[in-house]
Image (spheres, rainbow, N blue to C red):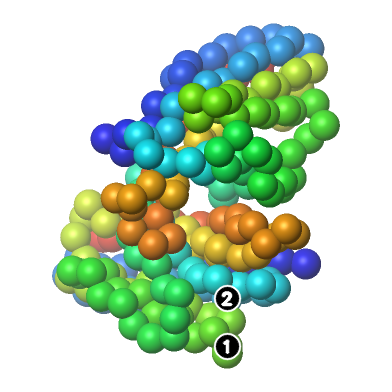
Amino acid sequence: DSGVTQTPKHLITATGQRVTLRCSPRSGDLSVYWYQQSLDQGLQFLIQYYNGEERAKGNILERFSAQQFPDLHSELNLSSLELGDSALYFCASSGGISGREGELFFGEGSRLTVL
Amino acid sequence: GQSLEQPSEVTAVEGAIVQINCTYQTSGFYGLSWYQQHDGGAPTFLSYNGLDGLEETGRFSSFLSRSDSYGYLLLQELQMKDSASYFCAVRDRVSGGYQKVTFGTGTKLQVIP
């Protein structure tokens, strides 16, 4: 158990809809990262937050947005969903005292299926 | 721009040694990490190299050469449970002095009896 919690684990929705994925980082971690992994693909970096502030942006579509709240949990909002958005969305956290240098702790992911 | 390259697939025999290479191109390089991911699972951290040289953790070792923009993961005494995807990941600097972590496309390792 990495200590990172993601909900929901599975989500099935229709094209054009909007969903929100939630992530609670490990206790003490200030950084949250979001990654998208399509079938048999690598991990595409979407966005990173540190203590509530956006710190880095990757290949995140304009239809997607995210934020990190004062309690450090983060949400990834996906809107106007398309079939190609079907993927596994991972949240990772880092920055706490107990992690090794360079270590990201990943949640179990949220599997999104768009029909 | 930024890029990471690693082989897409590797097959090795149980008990053998396998090396997975990773080359990268980036500016503001801080370090190279390796992660393991079993099918359907979450990536888990294996090792990190911030400086040149070899880092050893049990059966796994990782090497970095900053001058060659190259690193590798070495798995020894392969076991069937090592069958998984292995990702190299670059930690580098972005504007504002912050850091991000970018993953390669992954190497699928199949260990055969």
Front position in the image: B105 or B61? B61
A21 horizontally vs A82: left or right: left
Q: Residue A100 at what x, y percent from top left?
A: 33, 58
Q: Secondary structure at mark 2?
A: strand
Quarter that holds the N terminus of chain A: top left
List x then y, in percent, for residue A2.
31, 38
Query: The C terminus of chain A appears in which quarter of the rendering?
Result: top right
Pointer 2 chain: B
- In the image, A106 versus B15, the foreground residue is A106
Q: Residue at x 72, y 46 (%)?
A: A57
Residue at 39% of width from left, 62% of height from top?
A101
Looking at the image, can residue B66 be seen?
yes
Q: In which quadrant of the rendered view does residue A24 lie?
A: top left
Q: Are marks 2 and 1 in contact (CB under 8 Å)?
A: yes
| B86 sits left or right of A62 in the view | left
In space, the residues marked 2 and 1 are separated at their CA atoms by 8 Å
Q: Residues within 10 Å of mark 1 (few under 14, many from 20)?
A: few
Residue B86 drawn at (x, y percent): 42, 58
Q: Quadrant of residue A112?
A: top right
Q: Chain of mark 1?
A: B
Q: Is residue A68 above or below residue B103?
A: above
Point out the tag, 2 or 1, that comes first from the N-terminus: 2
Q: Amino acid at mark 2?
A: Thr
Q: Name which residue lies at 51% across and 71% down.
A: B31
Numbered tag placed on residue B68 in the rendering: 1
The label number, if any, that marks residue B23 in the structure image: 2
